[in-house]
Image (cartoon, rainbow, N blue to C red):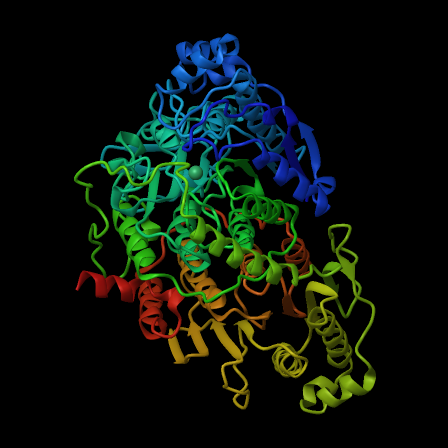
């Protein structure tokens, strides 16, 4: 993976010139600390390093008014007193004589990153910038933000790279909302009207396109900063070509910027309804489980349905542990997981742009985690209990209810969405909390102690020297692999292979025996920490899988998450002691045979398949916290190659990248190739046009979540919903 890193040290020039406790946390060390940590970790050197350029005034004008740009230009010549007076006209802002230069570099860095990714110079990247941007508005600085870097980048991407072209029925480049709901359409130069993918959901309707249509690439902006990026929301709130997702500390409106329109029921305006997604956190202390639940149950279902062509991240890290602003608990590696989840969208075209983040250690670690994920490294496993908070589930349920009319992927079988438990206006604007307010020293020291102990644990996780290995029984000349995916030649010792093969007649046959030796060797490499992930073929998937499970447990694995597709039954005498979670995807019935044995049908629609992965497979996998993931594609597994690739890509997360895929030999070379690329960190191919989940799919998932929600808290959405409504 080629990852661009855009930076310029002149962005450290602006700093606060007078006493202001509100603004003092936005300081140059935020950048220098992050850059130093990237260098120490050897990450900067692995990236394509680009020196940021200044955005032109015309580029700033894509979002900001000429008067505002001209006002900012004028700040370069102001005295300290004049700068302080001007700063006082805005909420939580300070200006410095170099602010205009720094802010133009920050916006320019975001544009350079977009250029690099959309021209194919890089696959993805990170722009390390200050001042941040997401609070900035058309004619106003706000919350340390001067120019809205990410919003300018989105508009620039559409203008500079959004060429009108005839794309055929498979890909939509235009998107339009009608009065009565939504419609996804493409406009072509030849004048033909195409519905997105040729498929319309029932409440969507095709209408002739007009000047309202937006012939631009669809852009998803994910704002994981702990503050609401109201600036971005205002700029795109009536625009269906940009989907804006923000989660933010809200506390029922008692946290800065105290806006009614930060709540879940602010969903956008006019044709943009449904394209603003706000997830307000009403308590502090949200952690890894809450953030993962928000992605799995809100952002990703909507994002897959939206099908963006570019993903921009407003990457603020004041939502990470230790930050005095956010007071949240998510650990740095959580941001690697969030990044990995976003990389399966838009062909992996992901551009992260720094926003907030005021605890230097937490900020630097989190930046490193995102860059590692962008480079394709597996994310370290998530620490701590994976149990979402009640308040988080309440917020998630509110936003799902608010967005359900706009997104078919959020419809729920047998539930009537209700708004809104967390929605109410504060009676008056409180003065208790605002950006930069000094916090209690004792609490800060305590948080720092917790943080450093967590970071110590994280350092114990070493990335294996080899990322991906494939072990084939026959040479496959047609196989095209990334250059550093290794072919495994070696096998386990003959005696060891024989000992296992004796258990199953089928494994004593020549080819199956050879395959078993290779599989065991690969498995041992993964469990010993030499190899991160691998793919092996075998003519006898069922007995081989059973041996792998037994060998895995006897070789030190504590918990193995096994996803079996096709004709593969759970071996009856396998230990049912909670060390193996077996999920079978096939058949007609949805059934939880025990807490650790689940069966679900394979859906025939993309919507049904995605719901199964996002609402069942990943919550189970993340909740189980396995140290090894096995994916077995048995006879008649029924998965298309892009589906298998997406499944494998997403299952890199739960066990820190330790994934072994077993493939029945009848499967094609092409499948092995695509699996090797995603395990190596490349994005999976598109699933194709979005089609709604069937009522049967939704019923199966609702049934399983009802049966399993008490044991697996990451699934708990519907249960909690009923409880809350009651
Ligand atoms: Zn922030």
Instruction: Say if 486 sits above or below 595 in the image.
Output: above
Q: Nearer the viewer, residue 224 or 672?
A: 224
Q: Nearer the viewer, residue 568 or 465?
A: 465
Res 460 seen here: yes
Q: 79 left or right of 200?
A: right
Ligand 1, what quadrant? top left
Assign the C terminus to one quadrant of the image: bottom left
Q: Nearer the viewer, residue 525 or 349?
A: 525
Q: Position of residue 172 (x, y in %)?
A: 45, 36
* Rendering quarter of residue 183: top left
Q: 433 left or right of 647?
A: left
Q: 311 left or right of 301?
A: right
* Total numbered labels placed on residues in the image: 0
Res 194 seen here: no
* Rendering quarter of residue 226: top left
Q: Position of residue 300 (x, y in %)?
A: 43, 50
Assign the N terminus to one quadrant of the image: top right
What residue is drawn where x is 40% and y is 22%? 141
Instruction: Say if 125 sits above or below 707 in the image.
Output: above
Instruction: Say if 200 sits above or below 288 in the image.
Output: above
What residue is drawn where x is 40% and y is 9%? 67
């Amino acid at each position: 993976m080629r990852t661009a890193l855009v930076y310029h040290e002149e962005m450290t020039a602006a700093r606060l010139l007078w006493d202001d406790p509100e603004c003092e946390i936005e300081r140059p060390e935020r950048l220098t600390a992050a850059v130093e940590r990237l260098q120490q970790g050897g990450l900067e050197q692995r990236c394509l390093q680009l020196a940021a350029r200044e955005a032109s005034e015309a580029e700033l004008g894509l979002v900001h008014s000429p008067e505002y740009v001209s006002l900012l230009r004028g700040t370069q010549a102001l005295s300290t007193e004049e700068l302080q007076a001007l700063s006082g006209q805005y909420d939580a802002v300070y200006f410095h004589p170099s602010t205009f230069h720094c802010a133009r570099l920050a916006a320019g860095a975001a544009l350079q990153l977009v250029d690099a990714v959309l021209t194919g110079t890089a696959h993805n990247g990170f722009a390390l910038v200050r001042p941040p941007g997401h609070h900035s508005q058309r004619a106003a600085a706000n919350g340390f933000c001067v120019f809205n870097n990410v919003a300018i980048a989105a508009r620039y991407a559409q203008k500079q790279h959004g060429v009108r072209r005839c794309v055929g029925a498979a890909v939509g480049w235009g998107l339009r909302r009608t009065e009565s709901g939504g419609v996804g359409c493409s406009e072509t130069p030849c004048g033909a009207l195409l519905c997105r993918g040729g498929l319309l959901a029932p409440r969507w309707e095709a209408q002739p396109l007009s000047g309202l249509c937006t012939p631009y690439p669809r852009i998803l902006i994910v704002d994981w900063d702990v503050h609401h990026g109201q600036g971005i929301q205002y700029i795109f709130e009536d625009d269906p070509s940009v989907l804006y997702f923000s989660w933010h500390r809200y506390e029922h409106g008692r946290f800065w910027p105290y806006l009614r329109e930060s709540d879940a029921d602010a969903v956008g305006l006019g044709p943009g309804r449904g394209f603003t997604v706000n997830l307000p956190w009403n308590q502090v202390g949200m952690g890894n489980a809450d953030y993962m639940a928000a992605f799995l149950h809100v952002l990703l279902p909507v994002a897959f349905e939206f099908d963006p062509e570019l993903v921009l991240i407003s990457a603020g890290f004041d939502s990470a542990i230790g930050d005095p602003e956010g007071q949240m608990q998510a650990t740095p590696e959580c941001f690697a997981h969030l990044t990995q989840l976003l990389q399966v969208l838009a062909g992996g075209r992901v551009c992260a742009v720094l926003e907030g983040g005021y605890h230097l250690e937490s900020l630097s670690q989190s930046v490193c985690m995102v860059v590692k994920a962008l480079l394709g490294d597996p994310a370290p496993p998530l620490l701590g209990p994976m149990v979402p908070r009640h308040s988080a589930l309440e917020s998630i349920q509110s936003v799902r209810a608010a967005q359900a009319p706009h997104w078919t992927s959020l419809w729920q079988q047998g539930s009537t969405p209700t708004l809104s438990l967390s929605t109410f206006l504060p009676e008056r604007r409180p003065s208790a909390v605002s950006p930069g307010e000094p916090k209690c020293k004792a609490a800060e020291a305590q948080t720092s102690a917790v943080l450093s102990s967590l970071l110590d644990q994280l350092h114990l996780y070493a990335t294996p020297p080899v990322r991906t290995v494939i072990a084939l029984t026959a040479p496959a000349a047609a196989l095209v692999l990334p250059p550093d995916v290794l072919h495994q030649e070696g096998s386990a010792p003959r005696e060891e292979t024989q000992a296992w093969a004796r258990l199953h007649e089928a494994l004593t046959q020549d080819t199956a025996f050879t395959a078993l030796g290779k599989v065991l060797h690969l498995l041992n490499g993964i469990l010993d920490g030499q190899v991160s992930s691998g793919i092996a073929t075998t003519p006898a998937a069922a007995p081989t899988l059973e041996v792998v499970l037994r060998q895995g447990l006897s070789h030190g694995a504590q918990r193995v998450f096994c996803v079996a597709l096709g004709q593969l039954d759970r071996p009856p005498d396998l230990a049912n002691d909670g060390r193996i979670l077996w999920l079978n995807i096939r058949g007609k019935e949805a059934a939880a045979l025990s807490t650790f044995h689940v069966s679900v049908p394979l859906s025939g629609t993309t919507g049904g398949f995605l719901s199964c992965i996002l609402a069942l497979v990943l919550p189970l996998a993340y909740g189980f916290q396995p140290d090894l993931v096995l994916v077995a594609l048995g006879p008649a597994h029924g998965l298309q190659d892009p589906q298998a690739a997406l499944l494998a890509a997403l299952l890199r997360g739960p066990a820190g990248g330790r994934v072994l895929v077993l493939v029945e030999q009848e499967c094609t070379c092409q499948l092995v190739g695509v699996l090797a690329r995603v395990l190596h960190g490349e994005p999976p191919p598109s699933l194709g046009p979005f089609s709604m989940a069937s009522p049967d799919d939704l019923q199966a998932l609702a049934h399983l979540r009802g049966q399993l929600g008490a044991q697996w808290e990451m699934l708990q959405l519907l249960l909690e919903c009923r409880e809350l409504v009651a």
